Amino acid sequence: MFLTLKDEPEEIKSALESENGNAVTEIPISEIDDFPDHPFHVVVDDAMNEMADSIKKHGVLTPAVVRKKDDGRYELISGHRRKKACEIAGIDFLPAVVREMDRDESIIFMVDSNLQREKLLPSEKAFSYKMRLEAMNRKAGRPSRENLTQVGSDLEKRRTNEELGAIVGESREQIRRYVRLTELKQTNNTFVKPSIKTVSELLYDFMNLYGVNAWALSTYDSKKGLIDNYINPIIGKAKIKDITPRFMDEYYRKLLKVQRVVRNNQSFEGETVSPRNVREIHKILNCAFNQAVRWELLETNPVSKATLPKFEKKVRDIWTMEDLTTALEVCEDDRLALAIHLAFSCSLRLGEIMGLTWDCLTIDEESIKEHNASLFVEKELQRVSKNAMNVLENKDVLRVFPAVLVSDSTMLVFKKPKTQSSIRRVWLPETVARMLVDWKKQQEEQKMHLGSEYHDYNIVLALPNGRPMEGQVISRLFNALIRKNDLPKVVFHSLRHSSTTYKLKLNNGDMKAVQGDTGHAQLKMVSDVYSHILDEDRRHNAEKMERDFYKKAENQSLVAPEAKPSNAATEQLVNLLNASPELAAQLLQMLTANQAGQAATA
């Protein structure tokens, strides 16, 4: 458990192997000072004791790096753990390479050599990033011996946190968050309670330290909307120390009388916050106060003990197979018909349908004939706010489409699916596969017709000019189809439920197979949402049991037991019929007539 030269990163190894007068020197440990404000902790644990034992046997195989101070002593740049292990082992000298470095160069070297550790505390990253950034900012103003141009010029004058992010494999925004953590610390690198007093202050830190890492774009946007519209205006100024379960009960009761806020051009005139909305708000606050407990701002979470308003989850209305067949027969829009078929046959979400590109489809003639036609779900089309994209630094975004209106506060993007399990292959029925083949031919004709005016993004269900078509276009067409043909009122997403229902019936309730098509992260989601389907089949099982067992047994008990002829009587009857064919024919005719009479009576 000790370091050798081969364990060092390449840039550190090359520095240690340099022949520019940097020979390894045995330096008395008593003359070596630790690096000022060294951000990495040196802990005496089992690994340290193991290193000390190894040094006793083999010595220090990787020399430390030091620089000479003005007072003649040495400042340790790299090798603090090796120095400590030598002290434990009772060794008075430390092999080291003496380097000529200024303060900023030594900071950068010290940080880079320690960031290679496997286990680093967030506080260690935070302070080391801050030290390196400050050194880089100072160096950016003057050339170095090895580089006659400024650092900013070498890296196209990118911001130093972007440069550091590229070096350590972190995003620019993540570097900023780590550095911000240093504001919540004392100079001895130990956490202290942040100066958070109010609910709004807690939610601000909660969103910027927790939400940006845990939430997707749409989730961040929706939760920020709930915070801005229903939490901060009402209880934002309340002190977190004054929050009690009773306080939360009163707040939730008051919320039920609050007018809903217009959002995303949706009007809720006359509507108040619903119990379901209250539960979503509760989830945010409960999670935020859990973080407050972890940050040692509070001892317990008062929100978790609040009483929530009663909420009855409604079962989503879905079409029967007859409804679906009727809808497809009367549908006159080819785009809508194809979207309906994809939602039903492949159990796709609307965003997944609109995010399909032709390279994700396998619909060649051979695959169709071999029943191996399929589509691969790897992205979805979604409209997200520019604010969320900026804060989350385009998290999970695969492609940003040009805005049609410059003033738009939102953008259309291709993004990764909802969950990892949503990335999946779904096999296509032959009929749907051939529909897609025909649709592609129509699209190719449209491309030829429009020429350069066609924006080719390779999207399956695109607008006539090739631009991405939003899901709301399909939803509007779907609602118009329902109104025009007096069909049962459902939402487009219910087709995914209809699909799952039908597939469960086809495979006798094999939820695991259906889960592969739906892309649900957990099997429990399928069983919870679609359990009513299985309950219906179980009811039919009871009917079958009654008919095939109990009724059958009851009917048999009412029939008088027939007298079984003896073997001797049977033998005499057989001999008589063999001797008189005419008698056998008459008996057969009588039996046939008797059976016909029974059938007519029944």
Image (cartoon, rainbow, N blue to C red):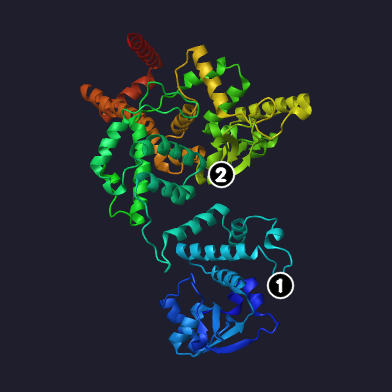
Mark drawn on residue 267: none
Report how far apart the C-alphas of labels 2 and 1 lie in the structure. Answer: 38 Å
Q: Nearer the viewer, mark 2 or mark 1?
A: 1
Query: Looking at the rendering, in which quadrant would you find the C terminus?
Result: top left
Q: Residues within 10 Å of mark 1 (few under 14, many from 20)?
A: few
Q: Position of residue 89 (x, y in %)?
A: 45, 87
Query: Closest to the observer: 197 or 481?
Result: 197
Query: Closest to the observer: 132 or 439?
Result: 132
Judge from the rendering whether residue 324 lies leftward or rightward of residue 272; answer left or right.
Answer: right
Looking at the image, is 133 positioned above or below residue 345? below
Residue labelled with disc 1:
145
Q: Secondary structure at mark 1?
A: loop
Query: Closest to the observer: 372 or 223?
Result: 223
Can residue 551 be seen here? yes
Label whose residue precedes the other's in the sequence (2 or 1): 1
**Residue at point 34%, 36% (across, down):** 234
Residue labelled with disc 2:
390
Can residue 309 be seen here? no
Q: Position of residue 250 (x, y in %)?
A: 26, 36
Query: Closest to the observer: 454 or 129?
Result: 129
**Residue at point 44%, 50% (across, down):** 210
For residue 158, which quarter of the picture? bottom right
Circles 2 and 1, Cβ within 8 Å, touching? The answer is: no
Q: Give, as a three-letter code, the residue at label 1.
A: Arg
Q: Residues within 10 Å of mark 2 (few under 14, many from 20)?
A: few
Q: Give, as a three-letter code, the residue at label 2.
A: Asn
Q: Position of residue 535 (x, y in %)?
A: 34, 31
